[in-house]
Image (cartoon, rainbow, N blue to C red):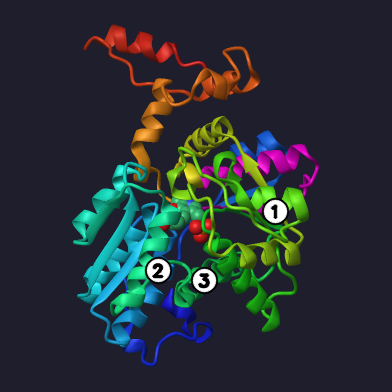
Amino acid sequence: MWRFRELLPILESFGNAVTLREGNTPLYHLPRISKALGVDQVFAKHQGMNPTGSFKDTGMTAALSVAKERGFEWVACASTGNTSAAMAAYAARAGLKSLVLIPEGKIAWGKLSQAMDYGAVTCQLPVDFDRCLNVLTEIVLQAPIYLLNSVNPYRLEGQKTPAFEIAEAFDWNVPDHLIVPGGNLGNSSALGKGFREMKELGMIARMPRISVIQAAGANPLAQSFARDNGATLEPVEANTRATAIRIGNPASWRKAARVIQETGGWCLDVSEAEIAVAKAEIGAEGLGCEPASAVTLAGLKKLRADGKIGASETVVLLLTGHTLKDADYTIDFHRGTLLSEAETGGGNSAIAGEIARLRRNAIAVEATPKAILKAMKGVTA
Ligand code: F0G
């Protein structure tokens, strides 16, 4: 990421950079998804391929470097999991102490295990993410702790670099459309800033449309766009299995709304069943991602069905987290225990059919070639 340092007004001395070699993540073509949707060029920019398995790393290398340069001893964040994993890793590299506040029982085990392994003081609070962030905001007023939530401006500087990488990959012709998941809404704001700055510098001729997709159970910005095109936000009580984006009162909603408005993008929400299907479809491309990332494909399918994306457009989905972050979710999906009947609309609904087609439960088979060959014949698609 630091090869873009001239575009990142962050450090007094580049020698203070705390890095785990983040950035330069792969951009994959999605041939099956492109064909199924009738859109030639659908790509995934996989930010889950960063050192701690999520897009947070490019922001953390930036902000942790500032914390180190300014002589802080402690850094802290409230998190739905990925921010805490990234912060704890970069703090450990820098030799700083880290404090993590997480909503108890509402983060994926992979992420919790990372915060523990990297040595953070990990506090599980019996409240949701939004309240964790409120408590932390009070703490940093009382003690010399450096706040590393995405309200930290240096996080956003680091998180704008995937925009540079996308433009570079398309030889400085940006894609028509970038689709991003929305939680606390720092990432969509940062990517918008990255494209805006490249345009101002004359590196690109136009910005891509940037659309933000939320889970239906945590959709304050989607509600806002439906109500008054992003002018006001009413917090919601958030609930979704995509725990990374289980956020009801997003801190950066104004910045994200501006990015959507200025680029002509959309803000939509998608259901739990749509997220689960989209995640399995990304898995079937050989990539995989965590549930929050899959909202991008679920959103693309809706935008395509509504005629908002044409057949000749180039679309990039921003995948934010690695599939191994939340293996429980994946296993529950394939076992058929993830979703309720109410969520799939009963066994005969179209989405239940898609789920049946995508599910690959592990099967208990006798240890004989005959039984195993028979099991292989059972594969339908
Ligand atoms: N996808 C993943 C995998 C995330 O972890 C997050 C946010 C988002 C999408 C949404 O990004 O908040 O910038 O709109 N995770 C934060 C965390 C909140 O604490 O890890 P956003």
Alpha-carbon span between mark 2 and mark 3: 27 Å
> How crowded is the residue under tag 2: few (<14 C-alpha within 10 Å), some, or many (20+)?
some
Q: Are marks 1 and 3 in contact (CB under 8 Å)?
A: no
**Mark 1 — residue?**
314
Q: Residue at x 67, y 34 (%)?
A: 36
* Residue mark closest to the camera, 1 vs 3: 3
The region drawn magenta spans: 293-319
Of pointers 2 and 3, the one earlier in the residue sequence:
2
Of pointers 1 and 3, the one earlier in the residue sequence:
3
**Mark 3 — residue?**
161
Cβ(mark 2) to ligand 1 < 8 Å?
no
Cβ(mark 3) to ligand 1 < 8 Å?
no
Say the numbered circle drawn on residue 1. Answer: none
Please name the amino acid that badge 2 sits on: Thr
Q: Are marks 2 and 1 in contact (CB under 8 Å)?
A: no
Cβ(mark 1) to ligand 1 < 8 Å?
no
Q: Residue at x 28, y 14 (%)?
A: 364
**Mark 2 — residue?**
137
**Residue 380 shows up from this direction:** yes
Question: Any magenta on residue 294?
Answer: yes
Q: Quadrant of the N terminus?
A: bottom left
x and y, in percent, of residue 165 in the image: 54, 68
Alpha-carbon span between mark 1 and mark 3: 20 Å
Instruction: Judge by depth and name the residue closer to the eye, 203 or 180.
Output: 180
Q: Residue at x 68, y 60 (%)?
A: 175
Question: Any magenta on residue 312?
Answer: yes
Q: Residue at x 49, y 39 (%)?
A: 240
x and y, in percent, of residue 145 in the image: 30, 76
Please name the amino acid that badge 3 sits on: Thr
Instruction: Judge by depth and name the residue closer to the eye, 315 or 269.
Output: 269
> How crowded is the residue under tag 3: few (<14 C-alpha within 10 Å), some, or many (20+)?
many
